Structure formats: C-alpha cells, structure tokens
Amino acid sequence: MLDIHDRLYGRDAPLILGIPAYTFFVVLGITAGLAYYFADLKRRGQVGEGAVKIVFSALVCGAIGSKIPLVFEGRGWVEVLYGKSIVGGLVGGMFGVAVIKKIAGIKLKLGNTIAPSIALGMAIGRFGCFFNGCCYGKAASWGCDFGDGLSRLPTQLFEAAFHAAAFALLVCFGNRAKTAGILFKLYLLAYFAFRFPTEFIRENAVVWAGMTIYQIICALGLVYIALVLWKGEINGRKQQQYGQK
C-alpha cells in the first residue's frame, strides 16, 4: 500500500524484485536510516530505552505530520490516507520527539545522530518517487517523461542529491559538533531553505499569497529554527558569563 501515491495519469510504477519501486525505495530508505541511527548510537554508547522512544515517536508523529499538508491542499481522503509529504513529516517528527522527551523526562539530545539518519533515508527514498513518477517538476525543455508525454524537471533527483550531500556533510562534521543536537536543527534549516525555492519548479497547488503549503511551512520552519538557534546562542553566552564569574 506504500506505492499508492500521486502519479501522472495513473502511470504504473516499475517493479524491483517483484516489489513496486516506490515501496522498495521507501522501505530501503527507512531501513538504512534506522540502521545508521542505532549503529551510531552504539558507537557513542547511547543505545537505550530513551533512544528507542525517540525514534519511535519520530516515525509515528512524522507519519501523521506527513498527512497534514495534503489536507490543506484540499486532497481527497484517499490521497490523504496514502499520500505523504516530507516537509510535513519532518515537522511532525520534530514536534513528536519534543513531546515524548517532555512526557518521558528524556534528557538525551540525539539530533547529531538523527540528522544524518534522516538524510540517508530521504536520499534513498526519493528514488522511489522518481521511479514512481510522483513529486515531479514542471514541464521544461529537458527532463523526464513521467507519463504525460512531457519532459519534466526531475525534482525528485534534485532532492535525492541534496539529502545525499547533507548526509555526507553531517557524517563528516558529526564528531566535531560541540553542541548536542545542533546538527538536526542545521539540517532542517538547510532543507527548508532548499525546499522553498524548489517549490517554484514543482507542480504543487498555490494556496495563499502565491505560495504552496510547503513553502508556507518552510518559511515558518525557517523562522522557528532561527529563533531556537538564536535562543540557544543567548543562553550559551549567559552560561559562559556566569561560569567565568
């Protein structure tokens, strides 16, 4: 059922090992992301009940959050039920983790491990969108035919490249990050900044002020993350001042 997704003219997705390509790559991406998450936690000696609760909450709330933008787009209940949005999923997962940490009193800050895990999963999962013929770009003089006879920009591959590059950078700087959890915030900041302009070359409905629901969420997300980082910087400076005194 993971392969029921937005396609042009009901185009059938190709099969990989007898499995619809969308399902294959989404499951592969989730599996790879979880494998990296627990492997990195084991390396850091942070595997425990709290880490499991965090990733479980991220997956569940991310799945719920991924439906919300589709509702604002006015999609039918079938599309909302089976469709997914990365932007909504990231926001839902972020708030889901914050809630479970508050409820369970979890003090762990695992953003430096979560960020590359998500980036890896997204980089792989977007290939499912490409082969499935969903999440496509606007018609252009070059690109791929996703089922309607037009050359369209392969925005799925643009996103896959972004997340692959983000994964490489996050892994590279993972051990150098001095602030616990900072990499997840920076990853979200970078993705929102990337996704906002790419919406102009994607086929998504405009809902308000010339923007798609994804651009609105990205704009709000950029402001929110910037405020969180600014607040963290201010608190850090205060702690340094008190420490010096």
Image (cartoon, grey):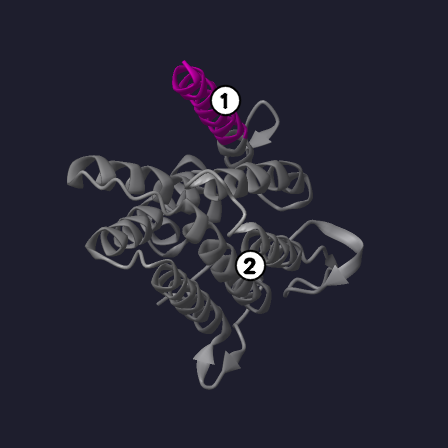
Per the picture, the main secondary structure of the magenta-coloured stretch is: helix
Name, please, the residue furthest toward the front. 245
Sort mark 2 into few (<14), some (14-19) or many (20+) by Cα contacts within 10 Å.
many
Q: In this view, does 122 lie to the left or right of 35?
A: right
Q: Residue 102: x and y, percent? A: 21, 35
Q: In this view, does 111 lie to the left or right of 188?
A: left
Which residue in the rendered view is the most extreme toward the left?
104
The reply to whether residue 85 is visible in this rendering is: no
Q: What residue type is labelled 1?
A: Trp
Vertical position of residue 21 compared to residue 238: above or below: below
Task: Identify the residue at the far bottom of this view.
Answer: 17
Residue of label 2: 134
Using the image, determine if residue 236 lies above or below residue 122: above
Residue located beneath label 1 in the image: 230
Q: Does the magenta stretch include residue 33?
A: no
Identify whether 245 is placed above or below 174: above
Marking on residue 37: none
Q: Nearer the viewer, mark 2 or mark 1?
A: 1
Give the residue drawn at x 62%, y 27%: 210
For the residues labelled 2 and 1, say whether their Cβ atoms are less than 8 Å apart.
no
Q: Residue at x 54, y 62 (%)?
A: 129
